[in-house]
Image: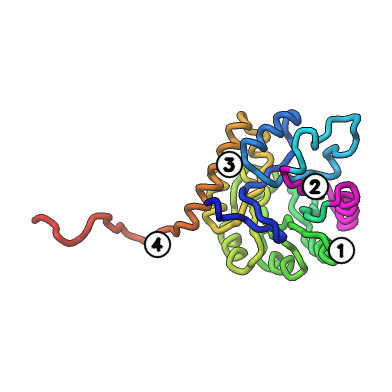
Amino acid sequence: MKNDKIVIAKKKFNSRLIVGTGKYKNMPECAKAIKLSGAEIVTVAVRRVNITDKKKPLLMDYIDPKKITYLPNTAGCFTSDEALRTLRLAREIGGWKLVKLEVLGDKLNLFPDMIETLKSTEVLAKEGFKVMVYCNDDPLMAKRLENSGADAIMPLAAPIGSGLGIQNKINIQIIRKQTKLPLIIDAGLGQASDATIAMELGCDGVLVNTAIAKAKKPFDMALAFKNAVIAGRQSYLAGRINKYLYGNPSSPKTGIIT
């Protein structure tokens, strides 16, 4: 599997697991969980995580941006203007161009506002950003995002933080067949097996935060997700057997002793 790398915006990564940095008890716990997960990309909520005020704990003191790729995101933004302003600020602070865009529709279900998301994607792409886009699992909208200059499509499995797992496998499979962009499941995973399922559907990776940070044993769960992503990818590449309505004996039908 060493040669099976995921390519995002022309950059290669060994790990197909992206991990969020929110909801942990403290930064040391966050850093250890990320290390155990093997993730090479971590999401950073620009509006919520301190990355500049040296009087407070700095994320960079615990997670080295020279070793781990920071993916600034627009968590907490509900309009295109908010999202654009946030990512432009991230570019000014750290020179980040690879970003994760999410524009939420309401505070209850946290589904993306796809009209605002699409508009933001078009603007960011024109400004030279490499945009990984959180979206719903609508194949039509996913295609529009691709045509608008997105660098990765990131459909939700279920509402953010819900832990419900993948609720619409068919739509994910349709998106997989129609896009050449990296397809990364983002939001709603609850346990390691959810990641395996996503990978077996042909997704290129998964993004996990709450399922690890809020697990009873975050370090164990981080390891579980690491192994689940690898197993799911290996299973997908191996090629599953065909499905049959009836039994199909594994023993030869010829040469039976009578």
- Mark 1 vs 2: CB contact within 8 A: no
Three-letter code for the amino acid on which mark 4 is drawn: Asn
User: For numbered disc 1, what is the local secondary structure?
Assistant: loop
Identify residue for label 2: 75
Give residue 135's position: percent from left, percent from top. Answer: 72, 57
**Mark 2 to mark 3 CA distance (whole Å):** 23 Å
Residue 69 within the segment the image draws in magenta: yes
Residue 143 within the segment the image draws in magenta: no
When the figure is inspected, residue 78 is found, relative to residue 35, above or below; the finding is: below
Q: Residue at x 64, y 67 (%)?
A: 179
When the figure is inspected, residue 149 is found, relative to residue 62, above or below; the finding is: below
Identify residue for label 4: 242
State which mark lies toward you, 4 or 1.
Answer: 1
When the figure is inspected, residue 9 is found, relative to residue 107, above or below; the finding is: below
Nearest the camera: 254 or 111?
254
**Mark 3 to mark 1 CA distance (whole Å):** 35 Å
